[in-house]
């Protein structure tokens, strides 16, 4: 084991301790803990400006660099949290970084969460935010859709919905550790179980059962492309950029997605970060910041 591997292991122990501290049996307390962490670590008022507003009852905010910056193109960001936790405040740990790295405005939003609002509520809200942007005069080709974990799932599901409705697709997609396969069939669920400091089988099972309550009685529901975008038809899609860590149980959700996209002749790039964990880009460390900068480079190349 190299010195860097030992450092990564020690850092993962710290990450796990922080994560375990926020995970609570009380779902509302868990959600509040995440939101408080996002406000604590994600808000940088001197560097970014946060403008809160609502779209037909959906809480939203613009995250803007507090300096002259690129106009025209924007990023639509879908937060993670297993479909039953997470918030735009929690996502600030990433949206702020991405906003500043790309010098672009980001719109983030709170979709309805399970189990109070199971699928397709989250996707319906995501579509509603997209429709708002269209009504505001933003061209689809001036929007990059990004998301982490479950938010990466929603980003792809939105693209599939737009394709089904024969609407113009966005300029591209950026996905941080996307959860694309709710059948939980990837080999990494077993191979990475002992090294992933964030996710485990119990968490993912609870999350998907909350999001798709009928799945236990009808497992075919988990294979629906709007639930598991891994199984979608992406022919004709714009470029897609994926980042994942080598130490996460959702590793195959990214690697299998890359393979399927390539077979469908979609321009796709996957960056695998050795020793990193699920959505490590949220962390305040050099490797995380480098990864966000890589994502920003991809976005700027598209824009």
Image (spheres, rainbow, N blue to C red):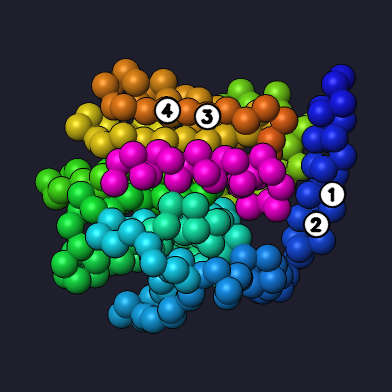
Q: Residues within 10 Å of mark 3 (few under 14, many from 20)?
A: some
* Mark 2 or mark 3, earlier in chain: 2
Mark 1 vs mark 3, CA separation in Å: 24 Å
Q: Residue 209 versus residue 230: which sits nearer the camera?
A: 230
Mark 2 vs mark 3, CA separation in Å: 26 Å
| Residue position for label 2 | 18
Q: Which of marks 2 and 3 is in front?
A: 3
Q: Nearer the viewer, mark 2 or mark 4?
A: 4
- The span picked out in magenta is 279-303
**Which x, y percent locates residue 105?**
38, 63
Q: Is residue 81 above or below residue 192?
A: below
Q: Residues within 10 Å of mark 2 (few under 14, many from 20)?
A: few
Please give the label number shown on residue 269.
4
Query: Residue at coordinates 43% horizontally, 52% vertically from top-left?
Result: 102
| Residue position for label 1 | 14
Q: Is residue 25 above or below residue 162?
A: below
What is the magenta segment's predominant secondary structure?
Answer: helix
Q: Is residue 201 above or below residue 34?
A: above
| Secondary structure found at label 4 | strand
Please give the label number shown on residue 271.
3
* Mark 1 or mark 3, earlier in chain: 1
Say whether residue 231 is left or right of residue 20.
Answer: left
Mark 1 vs mark 2, CA separation in Å: 6 Å
Say whether residue 178 is left or right of residue 301.
Answer: right
Q: Residue 188 versus residue 206: which sits nearer the camera?
A: 188
């Amino acid at each position: 084991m190299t010195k860097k591997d030992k450092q990564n292991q020690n850092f993962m122990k710290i990450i796990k301790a922080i994560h375990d501290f926020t995970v609570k049996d009380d779902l509302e307390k868990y959600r509040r803990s995440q939101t408080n962490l996002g406000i604590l670590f994600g808000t940088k008022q001197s560097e970014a400006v946060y403008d809160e507003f609502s779209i037909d009852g959906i809480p939203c905010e613009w995250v803007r660099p507090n300096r002259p910056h690129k106009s025209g193109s924007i990023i639509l960001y879908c937060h993670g949290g297993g479909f039953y936790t997470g918030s735009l405040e929690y996502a600030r740990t990433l949206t702020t970084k991405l906003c500043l790295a790309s010098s672009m405005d980001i719109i983030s939003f709170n979709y309805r969460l399970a189990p109070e609002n199971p699928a397709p509520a989250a996707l319906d809200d995501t579509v509603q935010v997209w429709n708002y942007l269209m009504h505001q005069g933003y061209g689809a080709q001036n929007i990059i859709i990004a998301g982490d974990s479950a938010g990466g799932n929603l980003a792809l599901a939105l693209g599939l919905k737009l394709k089904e409705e024969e609407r113009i697709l966005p300029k591209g997609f950026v996905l941080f550790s996307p959860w694309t396969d709710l059948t939980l069939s990837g080999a990494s669920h077993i191979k990475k179980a002992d090294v992933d400091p964030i996710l485990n089988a119990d968490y993912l099972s609870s999350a998907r059962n909350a999001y798709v309550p009928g799945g236990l009685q009808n497992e075919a529901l988990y294979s629906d492309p709007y639930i598991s975008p891994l199984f979608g038809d992406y022919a004709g899609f714009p470029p897609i950029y994926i980042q994942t860590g080598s130490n996460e149980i959702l590793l195959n959700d990214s690697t299998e997605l890359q393979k399927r996209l390539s077979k469908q002749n979609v321009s796709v790039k996957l960056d695998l970060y050795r020793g990193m964990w699920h959505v490590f880009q949220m962390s305040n460390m050099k490797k995380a910041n480098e990864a966000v900068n890589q994502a920003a480079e991809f976005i700027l190349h598209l824009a």
